[in-house]
Amino acid sequence: MPRDGQVPTALRRSDGTSVYRVAKGQRYTSPAVLDAERRLVQASGRTDGRRITAADVQVAMLE
């Protein structure tokens, strides 16, 4: 779902909010969900994970 700042003008309500959000709706979360999201964002920036070659992908697709 796009953030409000990324939604084209044509997809905004007269008050400026995105049509992708429930009008006058509220969102709820918990510390556990926020912590999980923080860990996902941190992990997405890592570049030291295992890697495979394009040839490995081709072999896997053929199998």
Image (cartoon, rainbow, N blue to C red):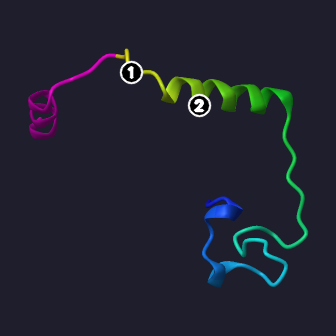
The type of residue carrying mark 1 is: Thr
Q: Position of residue 7 (x, y in %)?
A: 63, 69
Q: In which quarter of the image is the N terminus?
A: bottom right
Q: Where is residue 23 in the image (x, y as percent from the top left)?
A: 85, 73
Q: Main secondary structure of the magenta part?
A: helix
Vertical relation: 47 (above or below) 57: above
**What is the crowding at mark 2: few (fewer than 14 residues within 10 Å), some, or many (at least 20)?**
few
Q: In which quarter of the image is the C terminus?
A: top left
Q: Quadrant of residue 18?
A: bottom right
Q: Residue at x 37, y 15 (%)?
A: 48
Q: Which label is found at residue 21? A: none
Vertical relation: 10 (above or below) 2: below
Asked whether residue 26 is drawn in magenta, I would say no
Q: Is residue 30 left or right of residue 49?
A: right
The type of residue carrying mark 2 is: Val
- Magenta-drawn segment: 50-63
Q: In which quarter of the image is residue 61?
A: top left
Q: What element carries label 2?
A: helix
Give whichever of 14, 36 is nearer the camera. 14
Q: Residue at x 61, y 64 (%)?
A: 6
Vertical relation: 5 (above or below) 19: above
Q: Residue at x 68, y 28 (%)?
A: 38
**Circle 1 is placed at which residue position?**
47
Q: Is mark 1 on a helix, strand or loop?
A: loop
**What is the crowding at mark 1: few (fewer than 14 residues within 10 Å), some, or many (at least 20)?**
few
User: Disc 1 versus disc 2: distance between alpha carbons?
Assistant: 13 Å
Q: Which residue is drawn at 60% across and 75% down?
A: 8
**Circle 2 is placed at which residue position?**
41
Total marks in image: 2
**Label whose residue precedes the other's in the sequence (1 or 2):** 2
Q: Where is residue 12 in the image (x, y as percent from the top left)?
A: 71, 78
Q: Is residue 54 left or right of residue 40?
A: left
